[in-house]
Image (cartoon, grey):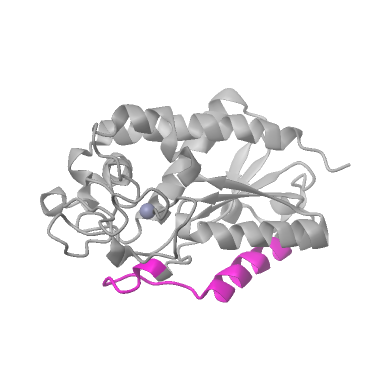
Amino acid sequence: MVRYYRELTRLEMEAVDKEETVVLIPIGALEQHGNQCPLGTDEIISEAVARRIRETLDREIPDYPMLIFPPVPVGLSTEHVNFCGSITLKPDTFYHVLEDICRGLFRHGFKKIAMLNCHGGNTPIIQVLSRELRSELGLAVFMINCGVFFGNQAVKDTVTPGNVWDFHGGEMETSMILAERPELVKMETAQAGIPRKFMGNRSLTVYGPITLGWVSEEWETEDGTPIGIGGDPRGATAEKGEQIYQSFVGSIVDGLKEIRRWKDQ
Ligand SMILES: [Zn+2]
C-alpha cells in the first residue's frame, strides 16, 4: 500500500514495517525554467511523478510497501541564480538537509530510501550522500534520477525532430507542466535555447568527455541573448507530457520491483 508520510498518525507510523517499506522522497528545485514555465517546475514534476507512481502501484502491486515523503522544494541551483527568482541552497546546506532527513528516517528504523530527483543539478550531492550513508550506517539510499530517463523512447518519440538540445525548460519539461498545471505555462513567451559556445566542438561539450561547470547563461537564443534553457519548448503539448510521464513511471516501477527485492542480509 502506498501512503503519504505526512498523513499518518504516530500510532499508524509505529505499525509501519520499517524493514520493507520504501520511503520515496521527491526532490525538486526552485529555479528559472525559461520565459514560459514556472519556477517550481521541478517540484511540480516530482509530485506529479510520485502521484503517478502511487496510482500505478495501487493498480498493479497493491501490497507494495511505500511512503511518499513531502517533496523537497529547493535544491542546488547555482547555475541559475543570475536569473530572477532562482533560489539555491549552498552545496553543504543541501547535503545536510537531505542527510538530516535520512538520519531521521534511519532513527525510526527505515532501511530503504529512494530519492526521486527531478533536477540534474542536485545529482552530485545525492550521489555523495548515498555513498556516505551506505558506508556509515548501511542505509540503502537508492537514486531515481528523472534526467536519466530523458533519453528514453517516449522522449525520442514526442520531442519534435531537430530539437536536439532539449532538456532544461524545453519541450519535454514544458509538456510535463502542460499535462499537470496548464494554467501556469505562458506559451506565448516561449523561446528556444542553445549552448552556442559548445556547438561545433567534438570533445569540449555540455556533457561530453571534457566539460566545465557551466552556468545557464551559457544557453542562449539564436541572437546570443542568455535565455537559460536547453531546447525549444514551442512544440510542447499536454498529450506529449502525459506520454512522457507514463513512460518514466513505467521504468521507475520496474526499478521499484527490484528495490523491493533488494536484501541487505
Ligand atoms: Zn527542470
Q: Quadrant of the N terminus?
A: top right
Q: x and y percent of residue 242 in the render?
A: 34, 33
Give above or below for 40 relative to 265: below
Magenta stretch secondary structure, dominant: helix
Give the residue at x 35% y 47%. 167
Magenta region: 79-104
Give above or below for 89 relative to 144: below
Q: Is residue 214 visible?
A: yes
Give the residue at x 56% y 75%. 93
Camera-side residue of 97 and 148: 148
Q: Quadrant of the C terminus?
A: top right
**101 in the magenta segment:** yes
Horizontal side of residue 82 vs 132, given as left or right: left
Q: x and y percent of residue 176 in the render?
A: 33, 42
Camera-side residue of 90 and 165: 165
Total numbered badges shown on the rendered structure: 0
Camera-side residue of 93 and 228: 228
Q: x and y percent of residue 219 in the render?
A: 27, 59
